[in-house]
């Protein structure tokens, strides 16, 4: 009996040691990635001061980039998750109030963080979807910065970020976008600017800058599990039988043509500021993407 207990002890001890080693490994590798520097040369983006441009920036922040879903309606930042094992992630205060970055940020700082997900010290921003905003043209990014410079200051200190063991493991072994700077297509030529209009080209621009691909996958065929809900196939294999009106109704009201309600994981209620023309352009583009099986 005593010998058996001893063996059980050895085995349990061995298992604990292996688990601790794995956790130590996960911390070491993820820590290295979180502390890695990304030297980033930023483009000079002109920041306009006229009211039409600021209004355009307002629209891009609310409707297209949906910055407010994470940074809050007053853009003063908020805690997004606070879980011991997962992470404490908070978005930044973008205003010029206390705790905000607006008072110290230069134009280059705005471009580096929004377009590349990199802080001024070269470290990556965590969970800030710059691989999506990379696609904003210089002109549009300029209006976003102009708008952010115009918002009223709000005081709010950002909670300290802390990534727990599960958050770290997810960032290593799954698609969880903890370090967006890794996914920004660097060292490639910038995509050409696309004129606004009800065109499939502008629809593609809105799909790219609207982050649809981060949940519906790069070819929009869906099949990714997001917070427990599988994203839909937006190619003609998935919604090819829908009409433009069906698409607009689904985004505006969260109700599909067959009456089924869309899960709140699909942020349709945050897309309410998109104009009808923008939705039409997106629909035009979706009709032209290659028909692909879900997850294909
Ligand atoms: C999915 C959530 C999410 C969305 C959407 C989002 N952000 Fe962020 N953003 C974050 C988080 C989280 C941080 C803090 C990252 C950190 O501290 O590591 C952040 C940080 C930033 C920073 C860096 C500020 C600093 O602390 O230096 C800027 C600038 C910024 N966001 C601008 C924007 C703009 C502009 C948009 C819309 C075009 C936007 N964000 C949309 C989550 C988001
Ligand atoms: C945060 C993740 C996320 C983002 C971002 C997102 N979606 Fe979705 N979307 C989903 C999920 C998940 C579903 C499936 C919902 C369900 O099954 O109830 C879905 C469903 C849909 C549907 C319904 C299709 C069907 O067959 O039922 C449409 C249309 C749609 N999304 C369009 C878009 C567009 C356009 C964008 C970008 C502007 C977008 N989505 C961005 C997660 C997302």
Image (spheres, grey):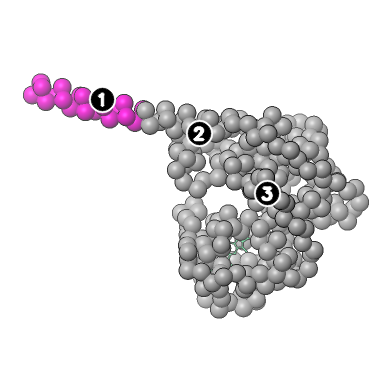
Q: In this view, does 185 lie to the left or right of 21?
A: right
Front of the two marks 3 and 1: 3
The quadrant where residue 254 appears = bottom right
Q: Which mark is residue 188?
A: 3
Residue at the image position 42 percent from the left and 30 percent from the top: 25
Based on the displayed image, in which of its 4 quarters is residue 2 positioned?
Answer: top left
Q: What element carries label 3?
A: loop
Marker disc for residue 13: 1
Q: What element carries label 2?
A: helix
Instruction: Of the two numbered discs 2 and 3 on the same chain, state the one appearing first in sequence.
Output: 2
Residue indicated by mark 2: 30
Picture residue at 60% right of the left edge, 38% below the top: 126
Question: Which of the labelled discs sits on residue 116, or is there none?
Answer: none
Q: Is residue 196 above or below residue 133?
A: below
- Establish if 230 lies above or below 47: below
> Would you say 96 lies left or right of 203 here?
right
In this view, the residue in front, 87 or 174, is 174
Asked if residue 264 can be seen in this view, the reply is no
Q: Position of residue 76 (x, y in %)?
A: 72, 40
**Residue 219, image x, y percentages:** 56, 62
Residue 52 seen in the current view: yes
Residue extending furthest right? 50
- Which residue occupies 65% across, 51% down? 132
Q: Give the range drawn in magenta.
A: 1-20
| Local SS, label 1 | helix
Pick the front one: 9 or 31: 31
Measured as percent of width and height from the top left, residue 60 is found at: 75, 55
Magenta stretch holds residue 13 = yes
Q: Nearer the viewer, residue 42 or 54?
A: 42
Q: Residues within 10 Å of mark 2 (few under 14, many from 20)?
A: many
User: In terms of image quarters, where does ligand 2 lie?
Assistant: bottom right
Which quadrant, please, contains the N terminus? top left
């Amino acid at each position: 009996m005593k010998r058996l207990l001893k063996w059980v002890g050895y085995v349990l001890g061995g298992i604990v040691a292996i688990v601790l080693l794995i956790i130590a490994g996960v911390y070491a590798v993820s820590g290295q990635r979180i502390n890695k520097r990304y030297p980033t040369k930023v483009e000079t983006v002109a920041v306009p001061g006229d009211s039409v441009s600021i209004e355009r920036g307002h629209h891009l922040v609310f409707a297209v980039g949906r910055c407010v879903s994470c940074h809050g309606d007053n853009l003063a930042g908020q805690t997004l998750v606070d879980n011991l094992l997962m992470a404490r992630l908070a978005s930044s205060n973008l205003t010029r109030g206390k705790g905000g970055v607006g008072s110290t940020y230069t134009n280059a700082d705005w471009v580096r963080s929004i377009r590349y997900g990199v802080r001024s010290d070269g470290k990556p921003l965590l969970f800030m979807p710059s691989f999506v905003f990379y696609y904003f043209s210089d002109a549009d990014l300029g209006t976003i910065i102009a708008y952010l410079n115009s918002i009223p200051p709000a005081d709010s200190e950002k909670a300290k970020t802390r990534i727990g063991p599960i958050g770290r493991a997810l960032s290593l072994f799954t698609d969880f976008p903890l370090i967006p700077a890794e996914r920004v297509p660097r060292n490639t030529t910038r995509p050409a600017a696309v004129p606004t209009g009800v065109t499939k080209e502008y629809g593609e621009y809105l799909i790219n800058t609207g982050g649809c691909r981060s949940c519906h996958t790069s070819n929009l065929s869906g099949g990714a599990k997001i917070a427990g809900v599988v994203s839909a196939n937006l190619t003609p294999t998935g919604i090819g039988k829908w009409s433009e009106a069906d698409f607009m109704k689904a985004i505006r009201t969260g109700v599909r043509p067959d009456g089924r309600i869309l899960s709140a994981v699909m942020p349709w209620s945050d897309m309410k500021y998109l104009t009808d023309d923008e939705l039409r352009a997106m629909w035009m583009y979706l009709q032209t993407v290659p028909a692909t099986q879900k997850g294909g």
